[in-house]
Image (spheres, rainbow, N blue to C red):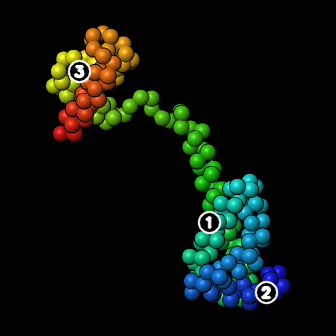
Amino acid sequence: MTGGKTLTPEYVEAMIAKCALGDRSAFEALYEATSAKLFAVCVRVLGKTPIAEDAMQDAYIKIWNNAGRYRVTGHSPMTWLITVTRNTAIDRLRAQRSHKDLADYHDVLAAPGATPEQAAIAASEAGRLAECISTLPQDRATAIKGAYLEGYSYSDLADAAGVPLNTMRTWLRRGLIALRECMSQ
C-alpha cells in the first residue's frame, strides 16, 4: 500500500513512466511504494545491512536512469524492478568478492621495494636535490641536511652553528624556499 492506495501493477507502471519523463515526485512515490520489497531483495543477496542499503541506492539510481527503457510486456512491473535490484546486488557481491580475493593475494603478488621506474625517478630526484643543496651557502646546506636528513632538532643545530634559534629557523625556511625554487626549474 502507498498512501492508502493498493500497490497495483498499473500504479507502478504509471510511476515508472513518469520517472522516465523526469518526474521526481513520481520517483519518490515509486520509492515509497517499492523500497521495502527491493530492500528485502538486497538483504537476501548480500546479507549485510550497510552493503544492502548501498546496493539498493545504486538500484534506484539505475531505475531512475533507465525508466525510459521499461516496456510494458505483460509481466509485472515489479518483476522489472526486482530484476534491476537483484542484478545490482549481485554485481555488488561479485565486486566485494573480487576485492577480497585480490586483498588475500596482494602481499604474495606485490613485489617488495620500488619498481625499476620508481627507483630511476627517485635516483634522478636525489641527484637534483644534491645539486640544489650544493648551491646553498655551506652553513645553510649543513643546517638543512642536519634537520631534514639526519633528524637534528632546530635547537641542536642552532647550538652547533653558534647562532640564535630564530636565526636557525630563518636559515632553514629560506633554504627550503631556495631548494623548492631550484627543484622546480
Q: Which mark is residue 58?
A: 1
Disc 3: CA contacts within 10 A as few (<14), some (14-19) or many (>=20): many
First in sequence: mark 2 vs mark 1: 2
Residue type at tag 3: Arg
Q: Is residue 176 above or below residue 50?
A: above
State the residue at coordinates (72%, 84%): 12
Q: Tell me the element at label 2.
A: loop
* Residue beneath disc 3: 140
Task: Tell me the distance, in whole angstroms, between the alpha carbons under discs 2 and 1.
Answer: 24 Å
Residue type at tag 1: Asp
Residue 66 found in image quarter: bottom right
Disc number lying in front (3 or 1) = 3
Q: Which mark is residue 8?
A: 2
Q: Tell me the element at label 1.
A: helix
First in sequence: mark 2 vs mark 3: 2
Residue 110 position in % (x across, y down): 48, 35
Q: Which mark is residue 156?
A: none
